[in-house]
Amino acid sequence: MRPSRGRRQSGFALLLALLVLLVTGTLLTIAARRSCHEAMLASQAQRDLEITWGARSVSALCLNDAGRMLAQGRMEDTHTSACVHRTFILGPTTFEALVSDEQAKANVNRLAAKTGGDLGSRLRALQSDLSSPLPARAAAGRTVAGPGRTRVQHSSLEDVLEVAHPSQLVDLDNPPGGVGRLTCWGDGKVNFKRADDVVLKEMLDGVLTQTQVEEALAYRRQAPDCTLGELLTHLQLTLDRRAQAASALTDTSSCHSVWVVAQGTTRKWYFLYVSKEAPAPAKPERWSYAW
């Protein structure tokens, strides 16, 4: 017996309804997944924005007060007066900040100019006390026109060192340590009142004799608040030597930096902010990096 026309239509309608339900369910599933993915992206973007603005707030606070913080760190007898470690808690996030005097470090651009291509050996010497020093790399940097020649201007430590992760550039537990003695910023003069002995020896190599360098270090230990003029007078240098030393050293600083490390539940964010003062009415030069 053949099914009636009405039954055939009812069966077709049922199949059509099931097909519509299947397609609708599939579309809803896709939409739900897309909605969840977009919600996760939005949440992550919001979190990244909060971290970024938190880091900027911490950096602004530290850079505006860097001189006082470094002086206070010296009184607290921290590792060195060239840097100071502070902790800030903003909402659910902890921000670790390492404020540094960039002029208490060895300027890689001045080192490169002094060594004439043998920068690698100087970089190794400045990291000689590290268990895992970062190897030097052949850096491209930025070519800058000079009188009669061109030179390479390095604008980041990643230009001159093989760096796999930003944590290799900042050690919050043992500042300044190794690469914390290197900088790409500032005018190249070293603040002899704050710099490590290793930094002064490297930057004064070829400027003063080894005996004069040791005498300068001894005088600094005896009179830590002496001025540059007092140091140079004490050393009794010739006019030529005195001029060379004065061009390599300073007793004030106009360039500071702050590393900001934000600790999340699953990862860390790394930021580096650098500020170099300029004579009024010019605005300070600023650099920022994020990882």
Image: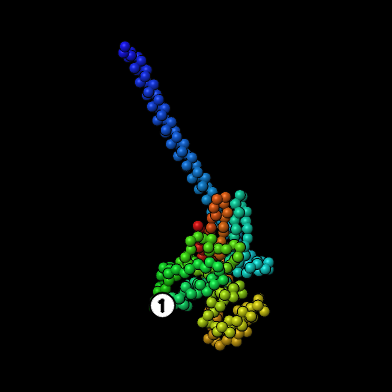
State whether residue 82 appears in this view.
yes
Give the colour scheme shown.
rainbow
Residue beneath the point at 60% across and 87% down: 236
Residue flagged by tag 1: what amino acid is it?
Pro
Q: Nearer the viewer, residue 212 or 236?
A: 212
Q: In the rendering, at what x and y percent does residue 121 appear?
A: 48, 75
In the picture of the structure, the residue carrying the numbered disc 1 is 147
Residue 209 at what x, y percent from top left?
55, 84
User: For this view, does 146 lie left or right of residue 53?
Assistant: left
Looking at the image, the residue that sits furthest to the top is 1
Which residue shows up at 55% across the image and 69% down it? 130
How many neighbours does mark 1 have within 10 angstroms: few (below 14), some (14-19), or many (20 or more)?
few
Residue at position x 60%, y 85% in the image: 235
Q: Position of residue 53 (x, y in %)?
A: 55, 53
Q: Which part of the image, by quadrant, shows the N terminus?
A: top left
Local secondary structure at mark 1 = loop
Residue at coordinates 60% horizontally, 69% vertically from top-left? 82
Q: Is residue 2 above or below residue 53?
A: above
Number of numbered discs on residues: 1
Question: Is 236 placed above or below 96 here?
Answer: below
- Outermost left residue: 2
Q: Is 286 situated left or right of 223 in this image?
A: left
